[in-house]
Amino acid sequence: MTDPFKSGYASIIGRPNVGKSTLLNRLLAQKVAVTSKRPQTTRNKITGVLHLPGAQIILVDTPGIHQSDRTLNTMMVRASVSTFSDVDLILVMVSAEVGFCDDDEFVLNSMQGVKTKKVLVINKIDLVEKPVLLTLMNEMNKKSLFEEIIPISALKEDGLDSLKSLILNYLPEGPAYFPKEMITDCPETFLFGEIIREKVLKLTR
């Protein structure tokens, strides 16, 4: 008897510049999201479809959650928060390099009352020594908000196989929502525009 097919949605959230888009691109092994050192690079929700044997993970990359009085930034944050109740799992990202900061606290506060299960993803572990990482993991574990805590380096692709397996543990049985040749529901014109915008961000200030 074969195992049942599993499928579901997981949103990737966090403050700006923790590596959400890099994680999406690395998991899909294809570039669908803009990456830049500038904050608020991601301005729209971007869906990526990860096809695995017997499973399909639909990942939702979101704009960085942050405090702002600007209308555009406020709308971007709303777009991120709107995913909380629409997914099966929330991947909350923090940076090992920066540690847990006030901006991360703002992200956690935005999830008050949200019943969707949450996994903490500590990114950029390649930039810190192991004692620093262990201290951060212990600090976050005391918050008792997360089902699990997993350290990774999205850029170096360290820990991504473990992350895929972890996500699958929280997804329900379900159908394949997207055909195998489809890795994103974004139209080509949107992707082309995002690539151009990424190059502009890298070459200008």
Image: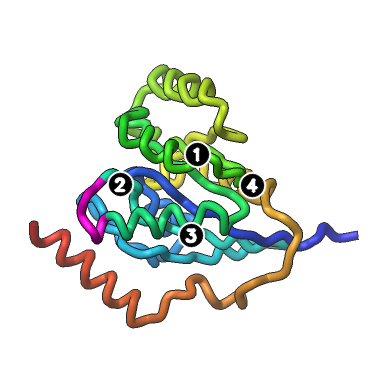
Residue 190 on the magenta segment = no
Residue 70 on the magenta segment = yes
Q: Name the residue under label 3.
A: 60
Q: Residue 165 carries which label?
A: 4
The boundaries of the magenta stretch are: 68-73
x then y, percent, for residue 68: 24, 47
Comparing labels 4 and 2, the label whose residue is closer to the camera: 2
Colour pattern of the rendering: rainbow
Q: What residue type is labelled 3?
A: Val
Q: Name the residue under label 2.
A: 16
x then y, percent, for residue 114: 55, 44
Which residue is painted at 46% across and 51% down in the image? 12
Comes first in the chain, label 4 or label 2: 2
Q: What residue type is labelled 1?
A: Gln
Q: In the rendered view, tell whether residue 56 sits above or below residue 168.
A: below
Q: In the rendered view, tell whether residue 120 sits above or below residue 71.
A: above
Q: Do the residues labelled 4 and 2 touch (CB within 8 Å)?
A: no
Q: In the rendered view, tell whether residue 183 sits above or below residue 64.
A: below
Q: Mark 1 points at which residue?
A: 112
**Label 2: which secondary element:** loop
User: How would you rate the neighbour count of disc 3 (Cα within 10 Å): few for under 14, some for 14-19, many for 20 or more?
Assistant: many
Comparing 141 with 52, the one in front is 141
Question: Gap between marks 4 and 2, in whole Å?
Answer: 26 Å
Q: Residue 67 carries which label?
A: none
Q: Which amino acid does label 4 sit on?
A: Ser
